[in-house]
Image (tube, rainbow, N blue to C red):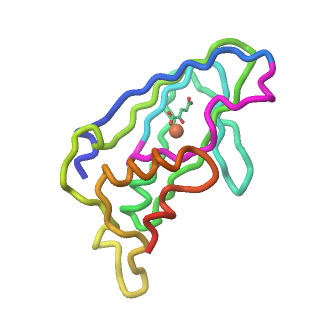
Amino acid sequence: MDCAKGHCLLSHYYPPCPEPELIMGTTKHSDPDFLTILLQDRISGLQVLCDNQWIDVPPILGALVVNIGDLLQLMSNDRLKSVDHRVVANNEGPRVSVACFFTLYTNPTTRTYGPINELLSPHNPALYSHTSLQDFIAYYDNKGLGAFSALDHFKL
Ligand SMILES: O=C(O)CCC(=O)C(=O)O
Ligand SMILES: [Fe+2]
């Protein structure tokens, strides 16, 4: 997949908020990469959507959170599912997180990505079209975070 060739690090700083119930730290989204490895500090806030319920992912000292991204869902033809997540604001203190995104879109190539052939059969047809990482990211960025998944656009 070459996805480790173009990983990119992003650090977030969430200032303390006097009225955290009025605002979101990061809106609901799934990540537009293959895999994300996330380091949280001691302040909680990360939540994942599971059976329509937001579940807290409490920080554990020294632990990393590994999230499946949209591109792994696309390549695995839905065997692996990207996770919807968000960060709620807090009034305890500043929160810092560092996310490492495994993807290649910072190194443009002509390669396209689609469901892996070995996973397909007459009973398990391809659910997604092939896409270049540039096209996928362009669509993801243009749509913005929020209600629906960028994967819907690539469904056959
Ligand atoms: O700050 C966090 O814990 C999560 C950040 C995140 O979801 C992202 O960078 O995609
Ligand atoms: Fe994320």
Span of residues in magenta: 19-35
Q: Residue at x 73, y 14 (%)?
A: 92
Q: Is residue 126 above or below residue 95?
A: below
Q: Is residue 23 magenta?
A: yes
Of residue 139 and residue 67, the one placed in the foreground of this image is 139
Residue 56 on image: x %, y %: 69, 37
Q: Residue at x 22, y 40 (%)?
A: 107
* Quadrant placement of the C terminus: bottom left
Q: Residue at x 77, y 24 (%)?
A: 20
Q: Is residue 32 magenta?
A: yes
Residue 148 on image: x %, y %: 59, 56
For this orientation, the residue located farthest to the left is 110
42 lies left or right of 109: right
Residue 36, picture quadrant? top left
Of residue 95 and residue 21, the one placed in the foreground of this image is 21
Of residue 147 and residue 126, the one placed in the foreground of this image is 147
